[in-house]
Amino acid sequence: MPPQATARSPFAGCLILILALGMLVSLVVFAAWLPFKQAAEIEKFTAPSPSPLPVEAIEGNEAKVNQLSERLEHFRSELLGDTAKPARIELSPEDLNLAIAAYEPGKQLRGSFRVKEITKDGLVIDICYKLNGRPRLAKKGEDGPVTSDPRYLIGTLKGHPRLARKELALHVDSLAVPGGEPVADGFMQHFSSLRLFESYVKDPVLGPAMATLTRAELEPGKMVLSRIPGETPPEVVGDADFRQGGSRVVKWLGIGACVFLAFAATMVFVGLRRQRRADKSGQTSQGGGGA
C-alpha cells in the first residue's frame, strides 16, 4: 500500500504573517502621524511669525554692567570659598535682563526671554520661543529630506527657580498666550521645566559654582540665590521630571513595540509547534502505510 499523502494548508502561516505585518504597519503609521498631530495642537496657541522682545541696552549702561559683573564674581568666589561661610546674591529684573544682554550664558535667550517682574509667588517672564512646526519635505537648498517651518510661542509665563542635580532650572507654573487660547496639557508637561543652564553644568567656571547652591528663592522684586552652611544641594528632580512630556510618547511607542514583538514571537512559536505536529503526523502515516 503506497504511503498516504498529507495535505498542508498555508492559510495558518499566511494569517500569522498578515497579522504581524498589520501590527508593524500600524506602529509605523502611528509614528508618522504623531508629529502632525502634535503640530496641529501647537498651531492652536502659537504664531507663524516672531515678535522679538527688547534686549537690555549695554551701551549707556556700562556702569551697571560693571557693577553687576563685580557682584556676580564676588558671589562666585564666595561659593567656591569657605563652605562654612554663607553666600548670597539678590538679583532684580533689571539685573537678570542685563545679564541676558551682556553675558554668554544669556545669548540664547536674547530677544526671546525678558523678565517682566518678580513677586514672592513667581517670576513673570515675557517669551517668544521658536518651535518646530508641521513636518514637510525639504525644498532645494534646505538640509535633510524632511524639515519644518518654525512656529513661535508668544506669551507670558509664570514660574519659579528650582535647583536640582547641580543645576539651576526654571519651573513653569502657568503660561498665557494672546487671545486666551488654552495651551495643550501635553505641551505644558513637556514645557514644565526649562533647563536654561544645562549646557553650563560642566563649564569649568560656572559649573562648580552652580553645583554649590543650596537655595533659589523669590522675594518681592528680587530672586535670591544662596548657599547655606550645613545644607546640601538638592537632588530631588531627575531627568524624568525634565522630560516628562517626551518620555510619555516614547513610553507608548515602546509599549507598542513590545506588544508587537510579543505577538510576533507567540505566532512564530505556535506556527513552529503546528509544523512539528504536522511533520510527526506525516511520519506516523508514512510508517503505518509501509507496514
Image: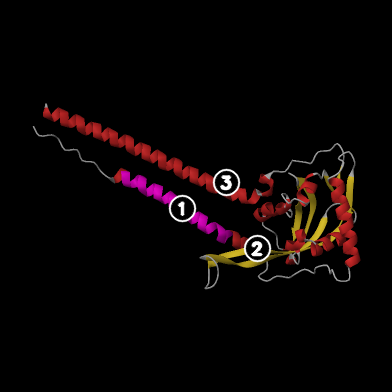
Which mark is nearer the camera, 2 or 1? Answer: 2
Compared to 57, does 204 lie above or below? above
Q: What's under tag 2, amino acid-wise? A: Leu
Quarter of the image where the C terminus is located: top left
Identify the residue under disc 2.
131
Residue placed most toward the observer, 232 or 262? 232
Residue 52: percent from left, percent from top: 74, 70
Farthest residue, direction left: 1
> Which region of the structure is painted magenta?
13-37
Q: Residues within 10 Å of mark 3 (few under 14, many from 20)?
A: few
Image disc number at residue 200? none
Quarter of the image where the N terminus is located: top left
Residue 130: percent from left, percent from top: 68, 64
Which image quarter: residue 84? top right
Identify the residue under disc 3.
251
What separation in Å lies between label 3 and label 2 (alpha carbons)?
23 Å
57 sits left or right of 250 in the view: right
Residue placed most toward the observer, 82 or 227? 82
**Is any part of residue 97 visible from this angle?**
yes
| Residue lying at 48% horizontally and 51% vertically, measured from the top left | 27
**Is any part of residue 192 visible from this angle?**
no
Quick one: label 2 or label 1, which is nearer the N terminus?
1
Q: Secondary structure under badge 1?
A: helix
| Residue lying at 89% horizontally and 48% vertically, measured from the top left | 88
What separation in Å lies between label 1 and label 3 (alpha carbons)?
16 Å
Is residue 15 highlighted in magenta?
yes
244 sits left or right of 78 in the view: left
Identify the residue under disc 1.
26
Q: What's under tag 1, amino acid-wise? A: Ser
Q: Secondary structure under badge 2?
A: strand
Quick one: label 1 or label 3, which is nearer the N terminus?
1
